[in-house]
């Protein structure tokens, strides 16, 4: 153990576990489990992967950051926590050695963010205590992002006193605040372009593209619902996705963003698991059916250049637990796309499903409980998932992080690749911003990611809210 000015760091050189001895078990769809790590108390809430490491965010008792070398056996190179309990979130740069760890204590009244590299050895390169906090909206991996080039870190936090939310943008190497933007509409998630110049902020049902140099809004548009909803943007900023009851894809035409894909299907919620590939060529979404207790759903993939659906993959199950989709990630060119869900009572489909661009299942992770996070490496070689040991609807603690390797996928044909604008500087007029009601009418606010506290409990029942 190390005691530093930033908190407590645990550095481990070796650890034996029965979980690691089960490594390299073959998956029937072609993926290989490289290693898995289990914790009897903490839940693996969020996960991120870069070229060197898997970064795990553990919550509840034993909440911490864990750094796992990809080519290791699941033994962490180091671990870090300021609090030892509470909630946490992670994000990492896919093209550089830089990650960010966001944490809040068990009471939810102390929020912090830290910058790390793989060589940090458990001591943050920098730390920042947020001046605001909200016990009802703790730290999570949806609320922190790192640009692909490792230059920029962004995070969104809420203030329980003023009811405002703030986007903070940091210089990734130093932790210096580049800009901050405060707004009364709640901020649920953030994503960044490759160079960190644009942040896409999910504000309930509003998508806001923000200039990170000054906090000015470049473009905004309403989605089709709120709650359990996360918007994503391509690496160059040319393509972004909004969702909810509909899946909508917007593309920059040289002067503004135009909607190029609009898709919906009966009783389906697209908000929890949608993604656009870094190159903007491919959009994917795992839509869950909220009308039958989330026991059916369907994965859809779209080609952005032609605005056509590539294909779909339906799933169905039974039991009393909800199979709610909760996350999606892609490799750089959209040839490997992974989706995470809570899964059903009887594990009728894998909690993490990995598809190629032909919508064929090429890998999977079968967790003992619900998946809460997923990520894919830039080259698509690795997919990692994080989970709870039991289903999200059940009381219980414990969690797992598992890394798999999937077969190489062919590069897509040129017709399936979107042509980006060489110099993308979006300057659409603010007048196209639709009005948004800050407090949508609803009976229950869905939370697909459990709001972790130091005691085991089931995840609240998720219901989408109307736009």
Image: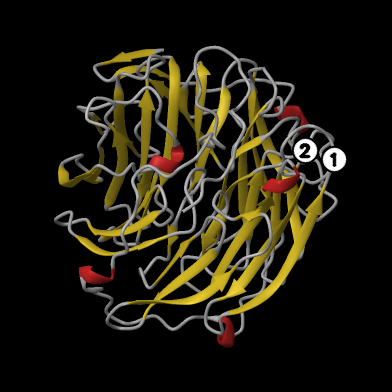
Q: Is residue 359 visible?
A: no
- Residue 377 is left or right of residue 322, and the answer is left
**Percent position of residue 460, x then y:** 59, 28
Q: Residue furthest bottom?
A: 415
Q: CA distance from mark 2 to mark 1?
A: 7 Å
Q: Which mark is residue 318?
A: 1
**Percent position of residue 381, x then y:** 62, 57
Q: Within 10 angstroms of label 2, few (less than 14), some, or many (20 or more) residues?
A: many
Depicted 122 relative to depicted 164: above or below: above
Q: Answer yes or no: do the residues labelled 2 and 1 have beta carbons within 8 Å?
A: yes
Q: What residue does disc 2 label?
A: 344
Q: Image quarter for residue 177? A: top left
Q: Say which of 340 and 414 sits in front.
A: 340
**Percent position of residue 166, x then y:** 24, 40
Residue at image location 85% in from the left, 51% down from the top: 28
Residue at image location 80% in from the left, 33% down from the top: 345
């Amino acid at each position: 153990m190390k005691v530093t000015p930033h908190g407590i760091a645990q550095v481990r050189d070796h650890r034996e576990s029965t979980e690691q001895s089960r490594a390299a078990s073959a998956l029937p769809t072609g993926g290989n489990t490289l290693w898995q790590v289990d914790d009897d108390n903490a839940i693996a809430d969020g996960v991120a992967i870069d070229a060197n490491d898997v970064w795990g965010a553990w919550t509840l008792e034993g909440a911490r950051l864990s750094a796992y070398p990809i080519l290791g056996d699941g033994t962490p190179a180091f671990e870090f926590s300021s609090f030892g309990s509470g909630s946490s979130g992670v994000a990492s740069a896919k093209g550089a050695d830089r990650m960010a760890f966001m944490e809040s204590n068990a009471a939810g009244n102390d929020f912090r963010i830290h910058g790390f590299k793989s060589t940090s050895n458990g001591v943050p390169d920098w730390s920042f205590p947020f001046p605001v906090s909200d016990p009802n909206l703790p730290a999570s991996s949806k609320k922190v992002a790192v640009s692909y080039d490792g230059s920029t870190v962004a995070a969104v936090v809420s203030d329980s006193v003023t009811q405002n939310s703030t986007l903070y943008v940091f210089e990734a190497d130093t932790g210096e605040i580049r800009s901050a933007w405060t707004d009364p509409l709640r901020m649920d998630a953030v994503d960044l372009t490759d160079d960190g110049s644009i942040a896409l902020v999910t504000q309930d049902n509003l998508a806001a593209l923000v200039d990170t140099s000054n906090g000015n809004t470049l473009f905004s548009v309403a989605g089709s619902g709120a709650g359990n909803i996360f918007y994503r943007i391509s690496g160059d900023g040319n393509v972004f996705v909004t969702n909810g009851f509909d899946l909508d894809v917007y593309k920059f035409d040289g002067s503004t963003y135009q909607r190029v894909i609009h898709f919906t299907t009966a009783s389906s919620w697209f908000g929890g698991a949608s993604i656009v590939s870094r190159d903007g060529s491919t959009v994917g979404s795992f839509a869950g059916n909220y009308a039958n207790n989330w026991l059916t759903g369907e994965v859809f993939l779209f080609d952005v250049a032609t605005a056509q659906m590539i294909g779909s993959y339906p799933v169905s199950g039974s039991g009393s637990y909800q199979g709610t989709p909760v996350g999606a990630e892609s490799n750089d060119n959209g040839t490997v796309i992974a989706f995470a869900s809570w899964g059903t009572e009887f594990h009728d489909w894998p909690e993490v499903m990995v598809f190629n661009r032909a919508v064929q299942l090429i890998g999977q992770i079968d967790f003992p409980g619900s998946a809460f996070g997923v990520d894919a490496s830039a080259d698509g070689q690795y997919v990692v998932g994080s989970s709870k040991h039991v289903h999200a609807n059940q009381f219980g603690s414990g969690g797992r992080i598992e890394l798999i390797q999937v077969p190489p996928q062919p590069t897509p044909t040129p017709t399936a690749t979107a042509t980006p604008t060489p110099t993308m500087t979006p300057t659409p007029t603010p007048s196209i911003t639709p009005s948004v009601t800050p407090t949508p009418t609803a009976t229950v606010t869905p939370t697909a990611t459990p709001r972790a506290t130091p005691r085991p409990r089931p995840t609240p029942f998720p219901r989408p809210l109307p736009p």
